[in-house]
Amino acid sequence: MISLIDVGTSVVVANATTQAFFGTNAWEFFTAGWFGRPNAANSWRLSLNELVMGAIDPSTNSGMSASYAASSGITGAIKKNIRDHGATSLATVVLAPVAAKMIKRLARKPINDMNRMVLKPLGVGVKI
């Protein structure tokens, strides 16, 4: 069974990782530029769409201004994002799973009661 606490932890870690490297959260990184959504909107915030389109057609500058793309490029944007967000993202990636494990350990009895009395009779395939 999938635990909602584990899913939440995975989302937090994914957001911290994409923030550290691409300057945006995971949802924005994967969806910006697709499905009619606008791109990430500045030179150091990168989306998957901008990276793919930049690899296909280098003249697009991967969504960066021409001057920034010529001077620093994608590697410069990633380095800037790591400088700006690396420490907090690293702390989040390390501490979020530890905090989730502690919460699950401290709240084991109420979580088991909730799963047994509410979710199991409903036949829900997800546990808290």
Image: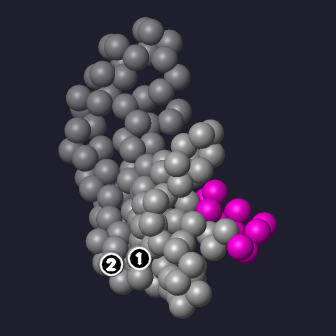
Q: Which residue is mark 2?
A: 84
The amino acid type found where label 1 is placed reads: Asn
Determine the main secondary structure of the stretch shown in magenta: helix
Assess disc 1: are there few (<14), some (14-19) or many (≥20) residues with their C-alpha within 10 Å of its C-alpha.
Answer: many
Depth check, front residue: 101 or 38? 38
Residue interval drawn in magenta: 48-59
Q: Tag 1's secondary structure?
A: helix
Left or right for 85, reference 126:
left
Left or right for 107, reference 15:
left
Depth check, front residue: 38 or 30? 38
Task: Using the rendered view, name the quadrant where residue 121 is placed.
Answer: top left
Assess disc 2: are there few (<14), some (14-19) or many (≥20) residues with their C-alpha within 10 Å of its C-alpha.
Answer: some
Residue at the outermost right position: 56
Q: Are marks 2 and 1 in contact (CB under 8 Å)?
A: yes
- The answer to if 115 sits in the magenta stretch is no
Residue 92 appears anywhere in the view: yes
* Residue 72 versus residue 10 in the image, above or below: below
Task: Using the rendered view, name the quadrant where residue 42 is placed.
Answer: bottom left
Quadrant of the image containing the C terminus:
top left
* Residue 128 versus residue 21 in the image, above or below: above
Residue 21 appears anywhere in the view: no
Residue 30 position, x and y percent, is 57, 52
Task: Using the rendered view, name the quadrant where residue 127 is placed.
Answer: top left
Q: Residue at x 67, y 68 (%)?
A: 60
- Image disc number at residue 41: none
Q: Which residue is mark 1?
A: 81
